[in-house]
Amino acid sequence: MYAQAFSGDRQIPTFLHEPPNRHEFLNSSGAVIPCTAFGNPNPVIRWINDDGTPAVDIPGIRHVRLDGSLVFQPFRTDQYRQDVHAATYRCTATKRVWHTV
């Protein structure tokens, strides 16, 4: 026996709020860079590094929130990381795909 769920009114992901091409911030304040999208089913938001790898959470430095925002925590100057703070990121929105068997 298997079950399959689907709906006739599916939509491809559409960005509601795209991140800016460039974002500068102070180490004392950090930054929140939003990225939101709409679709049916709700799209999965992911941030990708310039090399194509996922931008994963780095405790106390970088965090991807559930709402899709990329958060850079405030940091001391000796905590600066070129690979994180001066990097290129890309926000992606993809459809969720699942099967129930």
Image (cartoon, helix red, strand yellow):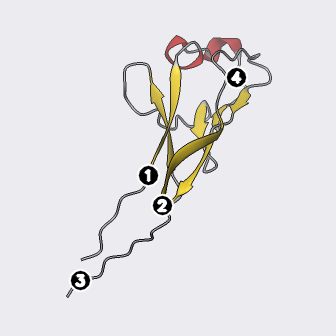
Labels 2 and 4 touching (C-beta < 8 A): no
Q: Residue furthest front?
A: 8
Compare marks 2 and 4 and give the one earlier in the sequence: 2
Residue 2 sits in which quadrant?
bottom left
Label 2 vs label 4, nearer the camera: 2
Label 1 vs label 2, nearer the camera: 2
In the image shown, does 81 or 87 lie closer to the viewer? 87
The image position of residue 91, as x and y in percent, is 53, 32
Compare marks 3 and 1 and give the one earlier in the sequence: 3
Task: Compute the Cα span from label 3 to label 1.
Answer: 22 Å
- Residue at 50 percent across and 61 percent down: it is 41
On the image, numbered disc 1 is attached to which residue? 95
On the image, numbered disc 4 is attached to which residue? 75
Task: Compute the Cα span from label 3 to label 4.
Answer: 51 Å
Q: Which residue lies furthest to the bottom in this view?
A: 1
Q: Number of marks in the image?
A: 4
Compare marks 3 and 4 and give the one earlier in the sequence: 3
* Numbered disc 2: secondary structure: loop
Label 4 vs label 1, nearer the camera: 1
Labels 4 and 1 touching (C-beta < 8 A): no
On the image, numbered disc 2 is attached to which residue? 10
Residue 48 versus residue 85 in the image, above or below: below
Kind of residue sitting beneath label 4: Phe
Kind of residue sitting beneath label 1: Lys
Compare marks 3 and 2 and give the one earlier in the sequence: 3
In the image shown, does 60 or 50 lie closer to the viewer? 50
* Numbered disc 1: secondary structure: loop
